[in-house]
Structures are given as structure tokens and as C-alpha cells.
Amino acid sequence: MFGAFLQQHVLVLLGYGAMVASFAALERWRPVDRQTAPSLFFNLALFSLIYLGLSGYYFGMTELRHYVVAMRHDRFGLPDLLDLRIDPIELAVRFLLFVLVADFIKYWMHRALHRVPFLWRFHRAHHSDRNLNTSTNLREQWLGTIYGDAVFMFAAVPLLGSLSASLPLTVAYAAYGFFAHSNLRLPLGRLTPLFVGPQYHRIHHSILPRHAHRNFASFFPLFDILFGTYFAPGRDEFPPTGLVGERHDSLWRIQMLPFQAATPPAWPDSDMPRREAA
């Protein structure tokens, strides 16, 4: 059973690699800044080591998810939100609802990473990328990976049931993270409050104090607007990214970050402007 899971695990990893390659090619269309191949390969190598190294963990969590889903069905009679047997139009509506709920959960998970000093210890690996690009979506640290996977599963599966969707919907959901992190000079203009785009998420990775702890949402800025962390970038606002005074460019060093004390950047004042002056 584990062998079959591991084969599927490797296929998922190859799929992520294909997404990085696809969006890296798109980044050449209108890049914010010049990228180098090593920055892509480093993030891919980092994620591959963690993803394969945690195969046993992922297998155990998959089995636990199956158990929770079965218990929902058998004991409480609760259906999966993403039931593949329903009408395609209804499935599309339910998928939109799923993304909204997932984004709400991930918003607060993400915000906690910036608020709780211990959680920031490993989340800073993600923010340390000075060359923000589509592969930054995979730049994580082993404990951060477990946090993101486990907390989301325990919050979403009891509520929504099986998180399995059709292949096109699964690919679209996964691809959006690569799009949001991409090195694209792509202002969304009036659509900025509606959808997270590369410029919107670049603000979240900015080293500038006025952008600190803004734009946590993964799909819809609605949650940033509702909870006071929204920052609408100006048309030509593409700030530098990374962490001031920190460089984490070693695969080994990144794995040791949870054991090193770290303080998140200061949160901006509540009256900090939410938009760059025109």
C-alpha cells in the first residue's frame, strides 16, 4: 500500500515541477526583475527533499483523512462538499465555496505564522527568498510543511469531507499558488480587491515596513479587507522582497530554523495607509 502511495507521491512532485517550468516560461513575458536558474532549482530541490523525506508522514495523514471522511459518512451521514457524482454546474459552485472556506482557514493559519514567534521561526524560510518567483511557492521548511498540512486537514476535513476533486479542479487549485508567487509585472487594476494576483502577493513578501504583514489571503483579498490587512498596490508598485538582514540560502540551514529564536517584523500601526499614494 505504501509503495503505491509513494509512486503517486512522486507523480505529484513531478506535477509541481511541471507547474514551475510552465510559470517560469510565462515569467519571461513581463518579469518584474531578472531571475536566474539557480533560484528556481534551489526551491525545487528544497521542496523535493522535504516532500520525499516526509513521505511516511504524508502516508499516515492520508490514512487518517480517509478514517475521518468515513466516520463523517457512516456515523453522521455527512456528504462530501466536492461530491464528484453531482451535476458539473453544481460541482463548480461547490468548488467555489470550497475555495472560499479554504481561503478563510488559510488566512488565519497564515496570519498566525506572522503573529506567533515560534511559528515565524520556520515561516521566515518562505519569506527569505530575495528572488521572488513561481518556485517560491515551494520554498518551505520541514516543520512549516507539517504545520500547513496538518492544521488545514484537521480544520477542513471534518467540515468539508474528502478534499479530493476532479483532476482539472485539483490542478487549477494547486496552480494558483504558483501564479500568485510568479515574477510577473501584472497589475490587476480594478480587479485587485477581487482576486489575489502576483503584484498583490508580492506586497506580502516586500521588505518595506509599510507592507509588513499585509495581504495574507491566497485567493480572495476579501478576507484581508474584512480583517484589516489589505494593501492595494499602486500601478507601478513592485517592491524588493526577502528579509532585511537575513539570508537563508543553504538547504541545511533552512532545516535548522525552528531551533533558532526569531522575532517577526513589527506589525504596522492600525492607521498605516493601505494604498501607495498616487
Image (cartoon, grey):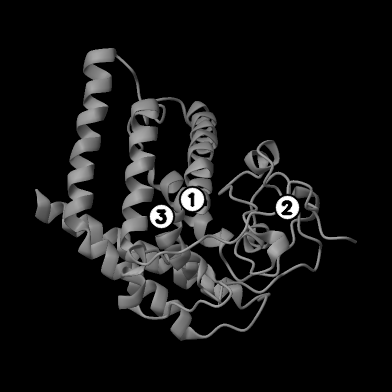
**How far from the left and from the top, in percent, is residue 173?**
47, 48
Question: Could you say which disc has been placed on residue 172 in the image?
Answer: 1
The local secondary structure at tag 3 comes to helix
**How far from the left and from the top, in percent, is residue 53?**
21, 64
Q: Residues within 10 Å of mark 1 (few under 14, many from 20)?
A: few
Residue 66 in view (yes/no): yes
Q: Which of marks 1 and 2 is in front?
A: 2
Q: Distance between the residues labelled 3 and 1?
A: 32 Å
Question: Could you say which disc has been placed on residue 231 in the image?
Answer: 2
Q: In which quarter of the image is residue 83?
A: top left
Left-right relation of 213 to 152: right
Residue 164 in view (yes/no): no
Q: Name the residue that disc number 3 marks.
A: 118
Hey, what amino acid is under mark 3?
A: Phe
Hey, what amino acid is under mark 2?
A: Phe
Q: Which of marks 3 and 1 is in front?
A: 3
Left-right relation of 210 to 179: right
Q: Report the front residue among 82 and 209.
A: 209
Q: Residue at the spot x=46%, y=26% of the render?
A: 87
Q: Which residue lies furthest to the right in this view?
A: 278
Q: Report the front residue among 219 and 90.
A: 219
Marked residue nearer the N-terminal end (1 or 2): 1
The local secondary structure at tag 1 comes to helix
Q: With respect to residue 159, does 266 lie above or below?
A: below
Quadrant placement of the C terminus: bottom right
Marked residue nearer the N-terminal end (3 or 2): 3
Discs 3, 2 touching: Cβ within 8 Å: no
Hey, what amino acid is under mark 1?
A: Ala
Q: Which residue lies furthest to the top in this view?
A: 76
Q: Residues within 10 Å of mark 3 (few under 14, many from 20)?
A: some
Q: Report the front residue among 164 and 251.
A: 251
